[in-house]
Image: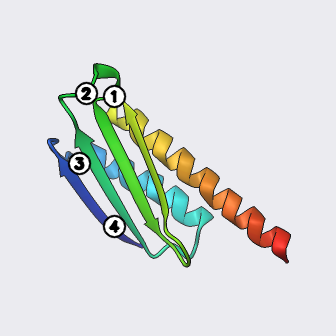
Amino acid sequence: MKLVLSTYNLTLTEAIENHVINKLEKLSRLQERAVAARVLLERDHARAPEQQFICSIRLGVRGPDLYAEDCESDLYAAIDKVVKKLEQQIRTRHNKLKARK
């Protein structure tokens, strides 16, 4: 899977990058046909402290892409919640395909 990791108003450390890669490996096990993942990590100083860190992931799969975004006070929590949202979208898509057959 191709990974594009970009940041805005945030320094990308090795720990953050490893955390994102580990979470995306979990997603790639659920969706084998994932082609690419675009991850945007952002820090917005104008927002309330509870919603300062924004993480959005666009997962390129066959058919329409999957997209999730979340705002949290902690960057790692935002990444975890976005991955959970994408897991749910993958499961929903899988169950719809099964029901059609």
Q: Which residue is mark 1?
A: 51
Q: Which residue is mark 3?
A: 14
CA–CA distance between discs 3 and 1?
23 Å
CA–CA distance between discs 4 and 1?
25 Å
Q: Which residue is mark 2?
A: 47
Q: Is residue 83 left or right of residue 18?
A: right
Residue 35 to residue 48: above or below? below
Please state the horizontal and vertical placement of residue 52, each as a whole percent of the image.
Answer: 28, 30
- Say few, some or many: other residues with alpha carbon within 10 Å of mark 1 (under 14 / 14 to 19 / 20 or more): some
Determine the residue positioned at 28% across, 47% down.
41
Determine the residue positioned at 69% across, 58% down.
92
Q: If the image is split into quadrants, where does the N terminus sit?
A: bottom left
Earlier sequence position, callout 4 versus callout 2: 4
Q: Which mark is residue 3?
A: 4
Observer-nearest residue: 17 or 85?
85
Disc 4, SS: strand
Question: Do residues under tags 1 and 2 come within 8 Å of each other at their CB atoms?
Answer: yes
Residue 62 to residue 76: above or below? below
Earlier sequence position, callout 3 versus callout 2: 3
Determine the residue positioned at 81% across, 70% down.
98
Please state the horizontal and vertical placement of residue 60, each as a whole percent of the image.
Answer: 45, 71
